[in-house]
Image (tube, rainbow, N blue to C red):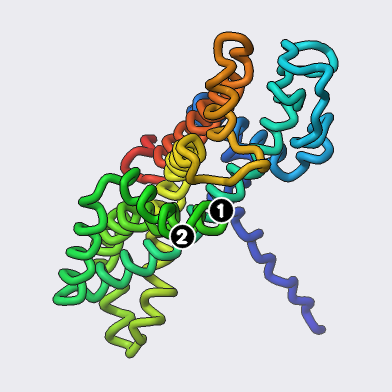
Amino acid sequence: MVQRVEPISRPAPAVLSSVPRSWLHCLFRLMRRKPLGAFGAVITLAMLLMAMFAEYIAPFHYNETHMRDRLKPSSLTYILGTDNLGRDIFSRIVYGARVSMIVSLSAVLLGTILATVVGTVSGYFGGALDILMQRAVDAWMAFPWLIVLLSLMSIVGPGIVNLTIALGVLVAASTSRVIRSATLSVKEHTYIEAARAVGATHARILLRYILPNVMAPIIITATITLGFIILAESALSFLGFGVPPPYPSWGLMLNGSGRVFMLRAPWMAMWAGVAVSLAVFGFNMLGDALRDVLDPRLRGS
């Protein structure tokens, strides 16, 4: 008689307790623990939406004039009033967000790429190359940023492309110091020695092991630098070295007619100043919150 053998029942695999956290969970945690950072994220998102959908948000074109409605205060037709040429202030603020976002994001992207190359290469290789690069960075950072920007813009001339390149090269020096410090800390880990032992090339170590581990400080510094870039772009536009008219720029709205008609129509300069202040505040608060969330030493329990 053949005895039937019962199959051995295997225990169900244990469910991993460490489930990857979703972006929504991280967003809720940011809102709960960092309310100012969440507020900065809302401001940043609003600026990006204004820049992307300016044609649909603004009721008028940024250069559309209504001479009969010159210097009108806030009303149902003109939410933030009009300027000396009858142009809608709200529409110019919305289109000005596009100019500020294009310049700031492009400059931060350019500066971050340059800073990442200089910081990682300098920190990884060290030696004479590190000394040479850092002395060049010291010489670049020794000059006041406004003097450097005014000198560059006076040579290459005003324009969005020239302004973006000048701002990107300017911020690359200080950002490379942060990335170099993170690289010096990462390259001392054991897995870097193991990668060298198995014959990994310098390029592979930099791209596969160094760069992913210094990505957190890169993101943090890039976010905080956005506020500085907007402030610098507004300062250059205020001085006449930024985006040329008739393109709307927040700094250009503060100067010129906004300064001339300050007593008669203060809203011409007031709302542009509010836009600059909100943008800088939003990016700084978001950068501080990202630093606290991404940095393990500041993350807490």
- As displayed, is residue 262 above or below residue 85? above
Residue shown at 75% from the left, 13% from the top: 72
Total numbered badges shown on the rendered structure: 2
Residue flagged by tag 2: what amino acid is it? Val
Q: Secondary structure at mark 1?
A: loop
Residue shown at 75% from the left, 27% from the top: 87
Residue 159 position, x and y percent, is: 56, 53
Residue 195 position, x and y percent, is: 33, 80
Q: Are marks 2 and 1 in contact (CB under 8 Å)?
A: yes
Q: Quadrant of residue 275?
A: top right
Residue flagged by tag 1: what amino acid is it? Gly
Q: Which residue is mark 2?
A: 156
- As displayed, is residue 148 above or below residue 118? above
Q: Quadrant of residue 68?
A: top right
Residue 131 position, x and y percent, is: 16, 69
Residue 132 position, x and y percent, is: 18, 71
The label on residue 278 is none
Residue farthest along the bottom direction in this orientation: 199
Residue shown at 34% from the left, 43% from the top: 146
Q: Which residue is mark 1?
A: 159
Circle 1 Cα neighbour tier, 10 Å, few/some/many (<14 / 14–19 / ≥20)? some
Q: Quadrant of residue 299?
A: top left
Q: Is residue 58 left or right of residue 116?
A: right
